[in-house]
């Protein structure tokens, strides 16, 4: 029974950084790179690597634009990302409750 629950965990969300990124994106329409970096206390490289991995999975949408003359990159959770993250949290909750 526990192995079935473990199999429902999504490997994309195993790292603390990705779990944190998705948690922030679930409750915000869009968040800039700098806001994420500050909120999560991650380095540019670390954050970029995790965002790229989530983008490749189709869980995060990247929007690049200019605000004035400054480039601004913002991120939002896709519908697929929201569903995958919700499924992951539900599996985690079921595991914590012992499969009930």
Image (cartoon, grey):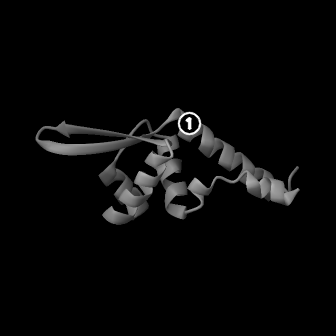
* Left or right placement of residue 65 versus residue 81 in this view: left
- Circle 1 packing at 10 Å, graded few (<14), some (14-19), many (20+), is few
Residue under the image location 84 percent in, 59 percent down? 2
Numbered label tally = 1
Task: Give whichever of 76, 57 is nearer the camera.
Answer: 57
Q: Position of residue 81 (x, y in %)?
A: 54, 41
Q: Residue beneath label 1, please?
A: 80
Q: Write the residue at 33% across / 64% down.
A: 45
In the rendered image, residue 83, in percent from the top left (x then y), is placed at: 61, 38
Q: What residue is at 36 percent from the left and 57 percent from the top? A: 48
Answer above or below: position of 22 versus 82: below
Q: Secondary structure at mark 1?
A: helix
Q: Front-most of 73 and 97?
A: 73
Depth check: 48 or 98 in front?
A: 48
**For residue 87, what is the image quadrant?**
top right
Outermost residue on the front side: it is 56
Q: Residue furthest top?
A: 79
Quarter occupied by the N terminus: bottom right
- In the image, what residue occupies the spot 39% across and 39% down? 30
Q: How far from the left and from the top, in percent, is residue 20?
A: 51, 56
Residue 98 figure quarter? bottom right
């Amino acid at each position: 029974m526990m192995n079935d629950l473990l199999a429902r965990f999504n490997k994309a969300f195993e790292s603390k950084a990705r779990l944190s990124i998705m948690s922030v994106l679930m409750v915000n329409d869009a968040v800039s790179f700098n806001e994420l970096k500050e909120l999560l206390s991650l380095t540019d490289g670390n954050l970029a690597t995790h965002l790229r991995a989530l983008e490749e999975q189709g869980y995060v949408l990247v929007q690049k634009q200019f605000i004035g003359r400054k480039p601004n990159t913002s991120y939002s959770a896709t519908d697929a990302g929201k569903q995958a993250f919700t499924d992951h949290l539900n599996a985690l909750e079921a595991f914590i409750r012992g499969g009930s």
